[in-house]
Image (cartoon, rainbow, N blue to C red):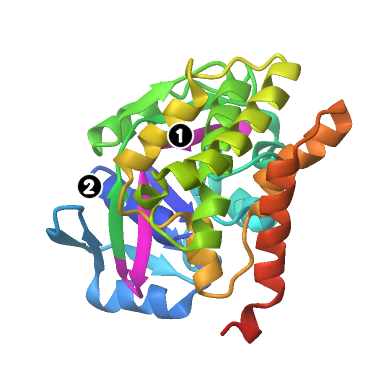
């Protein structure tokens, strides 16, 4: 299988490294220092036990350097770049090529389906965590299952994708319930990402009574929205699940924390702010998610003046 990773930051590079053991993988990313380091020295992936391995993978900042005939394009860009990523991936695909989003937040699948067609779109969520330690260097900061589901009943069988992922060591489960997948991950992100970015700590450090109080409020508001939308969540005790993810990814820096630390735009609009928006539509109050969203927006706006 020929696989293109569109958005080869921490998570894209991590998945690219694993999949490169069983497929032809091409990394596409605009960060030229990262691309050059991978091409010149290889991609270094460091595990939680501090062991590391080097992977020789072709990387490009110009997608036209990747030959057409891609069987699977995996989008790992930030959500605000989803439409452009889908437009980048589409002309690279083979006749039966598919696009898989493993991004955070709401709305990515719909954007991709609008551009590539619902029958060519797959959505998924993953429990793996990664941190970009530097150009050409990624830390694998947490493991767990990956779930994928077709956007349309007309989407060709995705069993082959599951088999490739499994062979690469990525535990993969096929689901038929997209809303369950997306909201299950959204609620976890809503509980962890913004708070970790605001107080600037790894996921595991959130497991204090003071932080848990805030996390629980954000999670409960999101669960109220999911219940109002009749969405069945993939776990019985949402807040307990959030704490479990914090434990499993103890040393991981949440993606929103990484963005804030480097002065980059975050994905708050498709996570906590998306919950606030849905709450307004349904007449459900979401004060904690609104406050977290406002603080993140304030951090984004004042990054250059940080003391």
Asked if 294 appears above or below 70 in the picture, the reply is: below
Tell whether label 1 touches label 2 (CB within 8 Å): no
Q: Residue 244: x percent and y percent?
A: 36, 33
Q: Main secondary structure of the magenta part?
A: strand
Task: Determine whether, in the image, residue 133 is placed left or right of residue 76.
Answer: left
Q: Residue furthest front?
A: 209
**Label 2 crowd (10 A; few <14 / some 14-19 / many >=20):** some
Residue 98 coordinates in the image, percent (x, y): 54, 37
The answer, for residue 121, to whether it is visible in the render is no
Residue 45, compared with residue 117, is above or below; it is: below
Q: Which mark is residue 242?
A: 1
At 58% from the left and 42% from the top, the residue drawn is 190
Residue numbers of the magenta segment: 120-137
Circle number at residue 259: none
Residue in the image at 42% along x and 48% along y? 206
Residue at the image position 30 percent from the left and 54 percent from the top: 251
Image quadrant occupied by the C terminus: bottom right
Which residue is rendered at x = 36% and y = 28% of the image?
Answer: 172
How far across and how far down the image is residue 112, in percent?
67, 42
In depth, the one of 138 and 223 nearer the eye is 223
Q: Secondary structure at mark 1?
A: helix
* Secondary structure beneath label 2: loop
| Label 2 vs label 1, nearer the camera | 1
Q: Residue 210: x and y, percent?
A: 48, 46
Q: Is residue 285 visible?
A: yes
Mark on residue 21? Answer: 2
């Amino acid at each position: 299988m020929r696989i293109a990773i569109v958005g080869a930051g921490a998570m894209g590079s991590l998945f690219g490294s694993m999949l490169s053991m069983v497929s032809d993988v091409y990394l596409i990313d605009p960060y030229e220092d990262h691309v050059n380091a991978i091409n010149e020295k290889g991609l270094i992936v460091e595990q939680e036990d501090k062991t590391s391995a080097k992977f020789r993978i072709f990387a490009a900042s110009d997608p036209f350097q990747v030959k057409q005939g891609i069987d699977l394009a995996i989008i790992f860009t930030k959500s605000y770049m989803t439409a452009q990523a889908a437009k980048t991936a589409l002309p690279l695909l083979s006749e039966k090529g598919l696009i898989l989003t493993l991004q955070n937040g709401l709305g990515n699948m719909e954007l991709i389906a609008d551009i590539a067609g619902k029958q060519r779109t797959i959505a998924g969520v993953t429990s793996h965590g990664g941190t970009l330690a530097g150009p050409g260097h990624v830390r694998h900061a947490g493991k767990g299952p990956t779930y994928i589901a077709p956007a349309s009943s007309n989407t060709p069988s995705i069993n082959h994708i599951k088999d490739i992922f499994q062979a690469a060591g990525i535990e993969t489960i096929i689901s038929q319930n997209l809303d369950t997948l997306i909201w299950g991950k959204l609620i976890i992100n809503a509980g962890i990402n913004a708070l970790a970015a605001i107080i600037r700590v790894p996921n595991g450090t959130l497991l204090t009574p003071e932080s848990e109080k805030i996390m629980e409020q954000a999670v409960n508001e999101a669960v109220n929205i999911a219940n109002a939308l009749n969405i069945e969540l993939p776990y019985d005790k949402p807040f307990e699940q959030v704490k479990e993810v914090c434990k499993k990814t103890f040393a991981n820096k949440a993606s929103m924390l990484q963005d804030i630390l480097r002065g980059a735009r975050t994905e708050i609009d498709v996570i906590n702010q998306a919950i606030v928006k849905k709450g307004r539509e349904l007449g459900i109050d979401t004060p904690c998610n609104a406050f977290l969203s406002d603080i993140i927006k304030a951090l984004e706006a004042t990054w250059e003046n940080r003391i």
